[in-house]
Image (spheres, rainbow, N blue to C red):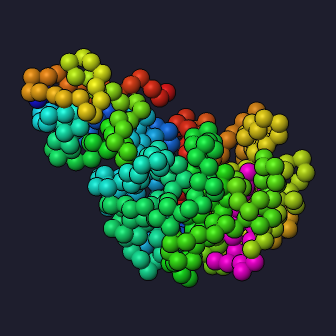
Amino acid sequence: MAVMQRRAGQRKSATRRRPTSRTGDRASRARRLATQPRIALLVATRKGAFFYHANAARTRWRVDGPHFFGQIVNHVMLDPRDQRTLLAAVRPGQLGPTIYRSLDLGATWHEAKQPPAFRKAREGELPLSVNYTFHLTPGHASEPGVWYAAVSPPALFRSSDGGVTWSGVDGWNEHPMRFKWCPPEDQTPDGSILHSVLVDPRDPAHLYVGASGGGSFESTDRGESWRPLNEAVEANFNPDPYPEYGQDPHCMALHPLRPDRLYQQNHCGIYRLDRPATRWQRIGRNMPAEIGDIGFGIVLHPRDPDTAWVFPMDGTSVWPRTSIDGKPALYCTRDAGASWQRQDRGLPREQAWYTVKRQAFCADVAEPVGVYFGTTSGELWMSPNEGRSFRQIAAHLPHVYSVVAATLP
Amino acid sequence: MRVAVASALRSYTGNREHVAASGATVDELLRSLDESFPGIRFRIVDEQERIRVHIRIFVNRELADLKRRVSENDDVQILCALSGG
């Protein structure tokens, strides 16, 4: 009987404590969620753009779209300087490319008055026309209204009025070495591209770009001059496997809190560079040998320069460019590439032949960081906990070209 | 003259299939269209003054280039090729 009383007492006591604990947990969780940023995923696909708005816990997603239904959308980017201007790189199948701008988070769109376009070719010059805009980057925080657009064929354009009018960055587009750096006959499946325009947060004149089949390049004068930055980066498709230029960076990233730290996922491996050094370190050599270090994208932790994620793909024989053995996984480094850990909890265990394109892989700025990717088979996945587990946000979308985790006001 | 516009371009014309334009050549006609519907020309003609790969312009049902002369009673069609998927 005494035992029963104690048990009853224990249960009663426990019953009294639990609500207090739950109330405390709820209050703590509410406080934490109240400080979380509002996240929206800007998903660009082969048939339009879709925006997924998260609740504070990032457990529910409200879809807004399609925008530009039926048109090829390569990239949609929110201006972090005003948190309301969106630019979208759009091209229908038959028509020429253009850029749209929204000042109300996509409720209405207005076409650029002067989209990126090359100057008329002079006699004897190669006549170039912009096939599509691949990548949009807001300029430096001190230069509101400045944007960069990287296009195919590889060229760079700049806007000073928030994307209404665009002009060529002649330092790149007219560079005497340009066709040696990026030979016009060198065509990847969707055409060679310029991508990964990186602006040093300490200096608006300091830029990096990546060129498919061209390499990485640096400018310290706002794009007026450029120099290759490819030392020790392999190009195993070239007779000289370590040329000055001609490498194939797939994606470059610069850490916002340590801007001298660069990462790149290259056609030939994963690399890190800590400036002012100019020699890249192949940190992909530390990946498991059976996985290798081939992929398209690389994503950085917004607050930890030592943490990065990659999505390895099959680069054997004919380069299937799918998840290895049909078992998709991210690999995460917490020590700047010295070691890598597999992350696949919640992802399909087999027969999932995902391809994740270079701009379809991103992270948000929440705590813990959310990691996201979209597949060419139209699936959208997220990890709410820095890769420890994954869940699917959407399926049956068109071929996903890019996923951007935007922070809304 | 009356110009028939492909569906992919009707976001510029207020969803109208037929619009009015003027000019002595196809090039002038497209510039006239661009004054009425800003931006439409660049979707049809690239920066090197070439009609885009998947666009065809017909005058009186004959394939035309930018230099083709046109007159008021001509029947002009701007069509998109079958492509994509």
Q: Quadrant of the C terminus of chain A?
A: bottom left
Could you say where residue A74 lies in the image, as x and y percent from the top left?
Answer: 49, 47
Q: Is residue A159 above or below residue A329?
A: below
Q: Nearer the viewer, residue B4 or A247?
A: A247
Q: Nearer the viewer, residue A12 or A76?
A: A76
Q: Which residues are magenta?
A: A259-277
Q: Residue at x 78, y 35 (%)?
A: A318
Q: Nearer the viewer, residue A90 or A83?
A: A90
Q: Is residue A288 left or right of residue A379?
A: right
Snapshot quadrant of residue B29: top left
Residue sitting at the far front: A123
Q: Residue at x 46, y 40 (%)?
A: A72
Residue A269 lies in magenta, yes or no? yes
Residue A163 visible somewhere in the drawing: yes
Q: Residue at x 61, y 42 (%)?
A: A185
Could you say where residue A228 lies in the image, as x and y percent from the top left?
Answer: 67, 66
Residue B14 visible somewhere in the drawing: no
Could you say where residue A362 lies in the image, as x and y percent from the top left?
Answer: 61, 58
Q: Is residue B17 left or right of residue A328?
A: left
Q: Is residue A138 left or right of residue A235?
A: left
